Image: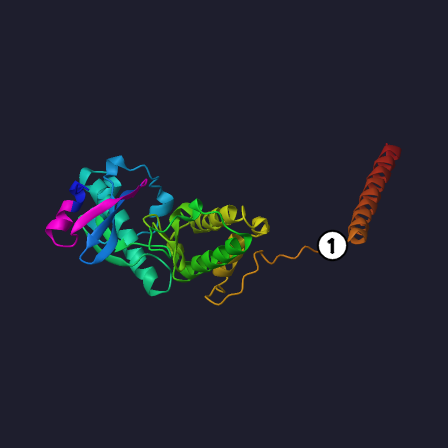
Amino acid sequence: MKIPKRIEPLIEEGLVDSVICQLMSGKEAMVYVVRCGSDIRCAKVYKETNRRNFRQSVSYTEGRQVRSSRRARAIQRRSDFGRMAQKEAWQSTEVDTMSHLATVGVRTPKYYNFFEGVLLMELITDSDGNVAPRLNDLILTAELARTYHHFLIGQIVRMLCHGIVHGDLSEYNVLVGNQGPVIIDFPQAIFAASNNSTQRILKRDVDNVTAYLSRFAPELACTDYGSEIWSLYQRGKLHLEVKLTGNTGEKIKPVDVNSILSTVNAVLRKEIAWQRYKQERWTSRQLQY
């Protein structure tokens, strides 16, 4: 196919030999299948700032460090340079996050290079060598849905153990390759320790995955892994080998009706005694006059 203009610099640098086809167009980027020597890879071309429609909310950017104070001030002032710096910050977040998570065992596409706003990474394929489908494109058995759910919850725990929350995890951001689910798209990743929205965003990630997979395994809809994971994280008890149950561990104790009635009766007796005392005092004063 015709070489997209944004990929031309990679052709000139010898990073890409040819473009095979466009794979997808998303809210943040266009993705192409490219040939790099004897390898077939993905090229993720980030959209220009004014053509992107992702909600760049402060709930995502909160806690992110901008290395240059000049860039930080420019972003706050929303100058042209600031908007460019903000775009670069979102792109670098994905690159840095993918690189880091791959080293700690989170299943993401392998990162190869980042040049001129284009991310070169592994092309995830299925067992037949075809481009891997997204999770939302599949019809699953109940058993496979449970397996995928267990795996993805484990990946969420692994990310949080290393201080990261995906931020936009759903059936649309999971590919199913020849070795199982692979998590993609990290420009909205947040740093758990420095973001006040971490609990809400983490729970939404868990709920998105659970809601989709519960279509095939309905019992998953009755779980609450998000609250359980967050509770363990807050108490410093979250670790890679933690055994999750899918509930918050709260025990509902039966109501002690007799104890409640006894308390109510005691209060009523005190109130009656107080009212009688006030009436007697009032009567006594009237007699004196």
State the image coordinates of residue 197 (x, y, percent, origin top left): 42, 48
Q: In which quadrant of the rendered image does the C terminus lie?
A: top right
Q: How is the image coloured?
A: rainbow
Task: Give the mark count.
Answer: 1
Residue 214 drawn above or below residue 275: below
Q: Which residue is mark 1?
A: 254
Residue 65 visible in the picture: no
Q: Alpha-carbon neighbours of circle 1 within 10 Å: few (<14), some, or many (≥20)? A: few
Give the magenta part as a residue range. 8-27
Q: Residue 121 falls in which quadrant of the image?
A: bottom left
State the image coordinates of residue 28 (x, y, percent, origin top left): 30, 42
Please give left or right for residue 32 compared with residue 226 in the image.
left
Q: Is residue 174 magenta?
A: no
Residue 161 drawn above or below residue 73: below
200 or 158: which is nearer to us? 158
Taking the spot 20% from the left edge, 47% from the top edge, the residue there is 19
Taking the spot 87% from the left edge, 35% from the top edge, the residue there is 283
Taking the spot 44% from the left edge, 45% from the top edge, the residue there is 136
109 or 248: which is nearer to us? 109
Q: In which quadrant of the rendered image does the N terminus lie?
A: top left
State the image coordinates of residue 195 (x, y, percent, origin top left): 39, 51
Taking the spot 53% from the left edge, 65% from the top edge, the residue there is 243
Q: Could you tell me the amino acid type at mark 1?
A: Pro
Residue furthest to the left in view is: 12
State the image coordinates of residue 108 (x, y, percent, origin top left): 35, 57
Residue furthest to the right in view is: 287
Q: Secondary structure at mark 1?
A: loop
Please give left or right for residue 236 compared with residue 21 in the image.
right
Q: Is residue 13 magenta?
A: yes
Residue furthest to the bottom in view is: 241
Residue 47 visible in the picture: yes
